[in-house]
Image: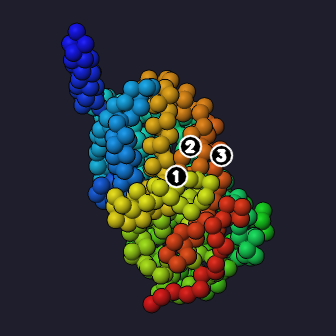
Amino acid sequence: MKQKRGILRLAVAALALCASSVGLAAEPVRIGFGISRTGEFAPTSAGPLAAYELWRDQVNAKGGLDVAGTKRPVEFVIYDDQSDVGKEAAIYEKLISNDKVDLLLSPWGSHNHFAIVGVLEKHGFPMVGSTASSLQIRSLKAKNIWFPTSSMPDAHGKEMAKMLKDLGVKTVAVNTVQVGFPMENRQELLPALKEAGIEVVLDRQYAPGVKDMTSTLTEIKRLQPDAVINLSYPPDAILYMRGAREQDIKAPFQFLLVGPTAAFFSKMFGANLDNIVTMGHWSPDKADWPNAKAFFEAYQSKTGEAPDYLDAVLAYMSAEILEQAVAKAGLDKDALRKAISSETFSTINGPVRFEGVQNVTTPTMFLQFQDGVAQIVHPPEMATAKFQPKQKWEQ
C-alpha cells in the first residue's frame, strides 16, 4: 500500500508539472509594440529594442510574467514603423484590434507617442510610455499613457536656466528643430532664461531633415556665446557635432537635446563627445539605485556594448513598471490602469510614482560626457561628477 501511495503521489506530481508546462507553453502573454527597425531613427531605436528584449528574456528565465499570481511566458509582437510617424497609429490599432495583444510597450520618441494617444484612449488600453515627454499630451489629460522620464519640457527649461546661472553663463545661442518635443523645450526654456537674467543672443529654428547648419554655426562663432543649446533630434545632433568641430565652436557649455546618449553617437564622435551636455537622469553608479549596475552589466553582456544612458534605460523602466502593475492587477485594463496610476514602482532609476501622466519622484537632471562616460552633473545633490567646460575639438 505504501508503495502504491508513493507511486500515486509521483504520478500526481508529474501530471501537475506537465500541466504547468503545457499551460506555460500554451498561454503566453502577448505584448505588442511598433519601433523603428529601419529608417533614420533605427540607430536610436536599437537601444530601447535591446532593452525590451533583455527584459523579456530575464522574465522568461524566471519562469514567466507574474500575472496576478500566475506565471506566463512573454511573447513579443513587433512591427517596424520604418521611422514614419504616419504609420504608428495604424500599427497600434492593428495590435489592439487584430492581433488582440494582452499588453503594449511604447515606440521610440515623443512624436510617435503623441501619434498613438488617440488609439489608446479610444480602446481604453493602458500603456507605460518610455522615450517621450509632452506637455501637449499632458494637457489632453490622457488616461492611458504615462511618462517615466523626469525630462518634461517645463521642468527642463527651469532646471537648464538654473544650471546655466549657477555656472555663470551670461549669453546663450538657441537652435531648435521644428519637431514637437524640441519645440516644447524651446517654449519653456526662453522665458526661464529671461527670468534668470541670461541673454539669448541667437534664437533660430530649422526644419526636420535639414542637411546643413553652416550658416547658423558661422553666426554662433561670430557671436561667441557662453553656451550653445541645440534642441535637437538625432539626425541634426550629428550635423551639429560635425559643424561645431569644423567651425571650432568654443562655447564652454554645449548642449544637445536628443542624440548623444545613443550608442552609435559615441562610436561616431569618440573624444569629441567629451564635455557635451545632454538630457538624461540615470547613471549605473548611483549607489541608491542598486539595480542600475545589474542592468548595465546584463545589457552589456547581451549586446556587447554599454547601454545608452537615456532611451534604453527608459524602455527598461517602462517594462519594469508594467511587470509590477501586472503582478498586482493582472491583465484587466481597468485594474491595470488603476495600479499604474496609484502605485509606487521600483526601477533601475529609483522609485517612480505618477501623478496624471507624469513621474513625480525622479528629479530633472542633465548628463555630461566625460572620458567617454555619461555623468550626472546637475542637480548637485544627484551628481556623479562636476561639470567640465568644453575644452577642444579633436580634428
Q: Nearer the viewer, residue 204 or 392?
A: 392
Question: Dot 2 corresponds to which residue?
Answer: 346
Residue 43 position (above or below residue 17): below
Q: Secondary structure at mark 2?
A: strand
Disc 2 or 1, which lies upstream in sequence?
Answer: 1
Disc 3 or 1, which lies upstream in sequence?
Answer: 1
Question: Dot 3 corresponds to which residue?
Answer: 361
Q: Secondary structure at mark 3?
A: loop
Question: Dot 1 corresponds to which residue?
Answer: 291
The number of numbered badges drawn on the structure is 3
Numbered disc in front, either 2 or 1: 1
Quadrant (top left, top right, bottom left, bottom right) of the C terminus: bottom left
At horizontal 64% and vertical 84% (from top left) the residue drawn is 224
Query: Label 1 near label 2: C-beta < 8 Å?
Result: yes
Mark pair 3, 1: CA separation: 17 Å
Residue 306 is left or right of residue 135, and the answer is left
Q: Give amino acid for label 2.
A: Ser
Q: Residue 156 location, x and y as percent?
A: 64, 57
Q: Residue 212 location, x and y as percent?
A: 43, 76
Query: Label 1 near label 3: C-beta < 8 Å?
Result: no
Mark pair 3, 2: CA separation: 11 Å
Q: Secondary structure at mark 1?
A: helix
